[in-house]
Image (cartoon, rainbow, N blue to C red):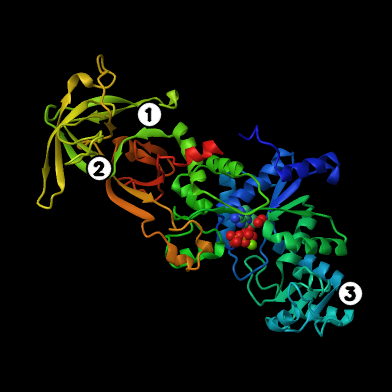
Amino acid sequence: MSEERSLNFLEQIVEEDISNGVNGGRVLTRFPPEPNGYLHIGHAKSICLNFGLAKKYGGQTNLRFDDTNPVTEDTEYVDSIKEDIQWLGFEWAKELYASDYFEQLYAFAVQLIEKGLAYVDDSSAAEIAALKGTPTEPGKDSPYRSRNVEENLRLFAEMREGKYPDGAKVLRAKVDMASPNMHMRDPIMYRIKHAHHHRTGDAWSIYPMYDFAHGQSDSIEQITHSICTLEFIPHRPLYDWFIQQLDIFPSHQYEFARLNLSYTVMSKRKLLQLVNDGIVAGWDDPRMPTIAAFRRRGFTPSSIRTFAERVGIQKRDNMIEIGLLEFCIREELNKTANRVMAVLDPVKLVITSYPEGQTEELEAENNPEDASAGHRTVSFSNTLWIEREDFMENPPKKFFRLGVGLKVRLKYAYIVECTGFDKDADGNITTVYATHIPESKSGAEGSAMSVKGTIHWLSAAHAKEAEVRLYDRLFTVENPAAEEAEFKDLINPNSLEIIQKAYIEPVLAAAKPGDRFQFLRKGYFVVDYDSKPDRPVFNRTVTLKDTWAKEAKKA
Ligand code: ATP
Ligand code: MG
């Protein structure tokens, strides 16, 4: 679909810039994560956009860690972010850190002080807020706004030296306290924070604010197109103001709508709470919306890139159905995943007409969508495991599976007719009995006999055991962030179901973490890294039913 679609608005801007020779036709974007959590699917969208746009126009992308807030940042996050970007299939031109610019940013701040465009303010946060005004009323000047240049230079240097405690002073830009844009009312450039930084250690006791770090970092790197999400639109005049006053490389900011995905939350702060409170098992718990979690859940990098492409680039916030992401992975795995049989909720089926102790090796096609995937053999015998739900004591009309007197085809094998069943004292079915029709063997001469239903099965003597983890939506409501209730109270209590003892084909016992399969009729599964040699663990990536397909066709 990528070949056919029309240009999005950012591609239009870039093409115009190139044809006008802006920056000599050069395109350099950046992806600027703050290393305060793992990347989520919203970041994946931003990565695909920034890297994809540059690549399309022969440019490059820098990875810049926006590490100006020492308190929340950590090297573990830096490592995970790099791993996730590479896994998604992108290569950055340079790995950079905003903290590497601290000295340069300090020099920029001194320049602004010297030009009379920045001042040290001793007011408390509350006092600053009180004078800030409202969107409809202008603010008032701080009593410190008229400090002279020498005093400002001295105080700012003392702030850096660590002479003052946290919160005692800030450096503010002298812009316009009456601006209709609140961000222009003398925004804070630096605050005092006696905190240990993951890279600069204790070298600094002042740290720049986002607005005085981001644009300047863009400019230092000579970023041509600085792409961010819509909430930064009101910051753009300030972004431009700093660049103009400092007379540095004119990077430009462009905004697009952030990705929101249904039935999950996307803020790193909230995701961190889920991890810290033990509501999920970690950042890569397969129910999380992080890239690491989607990877563990069995999603492929290409399915996520396809998703980002299909979502497109918008200028207005909207909510994307989780079903679209599932559609993308299902569509891919349908073509690439080998089919195997696994019985998740086993009940015994005894074929009384089949000789006890006899084994037959039946040929099974690995993937009907891919002839090159070849064949394997599956062992058949008189005692099988089938799914409990494939037998009913009192089947309704149109139940095309097993019930006394009903016929069904055993995949790759025979048509069988159910003859009876056993129940235990509690009324649970323990064994189902059937006879087989020898002439109905799949692939055999005269096997054209047909029945409405086909079920999967495993020979009890040959099957291996496995743990299987089934996942559902993490939240019970479409947009947890919009609800009045605390988001943590909206967790779906059935979001994880662990099957301790499922049965799988023996070939699966040798599968390695990351290997993907279709379990016939049950969905797509991936081998989890919790697997042990004698105990594989499978995660369900997605079910087979694609309720989204109808919607996608309409669109
Ligand atoms: P969060 O609120 O989830 O913590 P953030 O914006 O603070 O996100 P950053 O690490 O600062 O996270 O973001 C890095 C880049 O990813 C930024 O350019 C940001 O605009 C972009 N980004 C973050 N969330 C989304 C999203 N949901 N959709 C698209 N882009 C996003
Ligand atoms: Mg941020």
Q: Which mark is residue 366?
A: 1
Q: Which of these two is toward me, 418 or 397?
A: 397
Q: Secondary structure at mark 2?
A: helix
Q: Residue at x 77, y 43 (%)?
A: 14
Examine the rendered structure and indicate whether residue 318 appears above or below residue 441. Answer: below
Q: CA distance from mark 1 to mark 3?
A: 74 Å
Identify the amino acid type marked 3.
Gly
Please report whichever mark, 3 or 2, sits nearer to the chain's N-terminal start: 3
Where does the image place residue 301, in percent across and percent down from the top left? 54, 42
* C-alpha distance separating marks 1 and 2: 25 Å
Answer yes or no: is residue 106 visible.
yes
Q: In terms of depth relative to the viewer, which is nearer, 481 or 366?
A: 481
Give the residue type that dot 1 points to.
Answer: Asn
Q: Which quadrant of the frame does ligand 2 lie within?
A: bottom right
Q: Nearer the viewer, mark 3 or mark 2?
A: 2
Q: Residue furthest top?
A: 445
Confirm if mark 2 falls within 8 A of ligand 1: no
Check if mark 1's residue and mark 2's residue have beta carbons within 8 Å: no
Which label is found at residue 116? 3
N-term-proximal mark, 1 vs 3: 3
Q: Nearer the viewer, mark 1 or mark 2?
A: 2
- Which numbered marker is on residue 389? 2
Q: Secondary structure at mark 3?
A: loop
Quarter of the figure with the C terminus: top right
